[in-house]
Amino acid sequence: MAMDTKANKGIVLVEDQEITISNPDKLLWPELGITKLHYLEKLIRLAPHLIHYCRNRYLTTIRFPNGYADKSFYQKNAPAPIPPFVRTAELEGINYVHLDSLPTLMWLGNLACLEFHPSFHRIGETLPEEWLIDIDPSIDPEPRIMEAAEIIGTILDGMGIRSVPKTSGATGVQIYVPIERGYTFEQLRKIGHFVASFAVNKHPELFTIERLKKDRGDLIYIDYLQHWYGKTLSAPYTPRARQAATVSTPLHWEEVARRVSPLDFNLLTIEDRLKQKGDLIQQVPPQNLDRVLSFIQ
């Protein structure tokens, strides 16, 4: 990446595409001294992994023009003007950005898109690409979140399903299951309901499947309903608009057992982690769920 800075604006050359960077010195995470330019440099390091999980998906981003702690808004429709290198995809009247290249990621980064939330299904398709269960705490911080994740992981393991826990980057943990192609959202929801109900019955002091947040108390919500056509969840390796500049990061189950803190996985640490461990999700083969479906249907 080459940059020619002029006053409060610069030009970034990325894969032969010129991208104008506005306010490169604007602080997006003031407490950590992370400027927009610094953020873009971090996105370049995350790009191979983040783009992998956003390519061929309908992408929703969350923009924070004045930094993570200021006003924000969801961006579904691609904002005009769209550079010629940015591809889009339409779904139900919305023209989504297709994040399939580093120049597109840099363009979004310049727009202060601090979070990336892709659809669970590919562009033009209706079947899910993976399966996720979102473990969503009712209080922040939630000291029991890793315990909760471990319980769900143990239930899945007992069903013969290998999974990868990942920090949401915010308050929760998501259980990511690579799956063989061909399962429907309806089938995965049935398994999710089974797992969630079993967990609530075994640990009523810890879990709930109550949809209304006001009725959950301090219980941890097992959200198996979010995984659905047209819905989104934070991508693996997306930054999050939190004070610690956290990044949604796949974990080893051994790390969950040690009760690691989600705050440890952030824009300042993620590069070294990826060099050391690689993408943990890619290290788990797609799971066949036929046997599980046969006994819960």
Image (cartoon, helix red, strand yellow):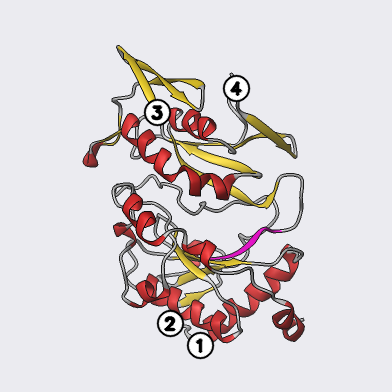
Query: Looking at the image, is 154 positioned above or below residue 265?
Result: below
Question: Mark 3 highlights which residue?
Answer: 1
Question: Mark 4 highlights which residue?
Answer: 82
User: What residue is at 39 percent from the left and 59 percent from the top?
Assistant: 171
> Mark 2 or mark 3: which is in front?
3
| Of callouts 2 and 3, the N-terminal one | 3
- Which element carries disc 1, helix, strand or loop? helix
> Mark 4 or mark 3: which is in front?
3
| Of callouts 3 and 1, the N-terminal one | 3
Q: Amino acid at mark 4?
A: Ile
Q: CA distance from mark 4 to mark 3?
A: 21 Å
Q: Amino acid at mark 3?
A: Met
Please indicate whether residue 159 sits to the left or right of residue 267 in the image: right
Q: Amino acid at mark 1?
A: Lys
Q: Are marks 3 and 1 in contact (CB under 8 Å)?
A: no
**Which stretch did the figure color magenta?**
128-134
Q: CA distance from mark 1 to mark 2?
A: 9 Å
Q: Amino acid at mark 2?
A: Glu
Q: CA distance from mark 4 to mark 2?
A: 50 Å
Q: CA distance from mark 3 to mark 1?
A: 53 Å
> Mark 1 or mark 4: which is in front?
4
Question: Mark 2 highlights which residue?
Answer: 205
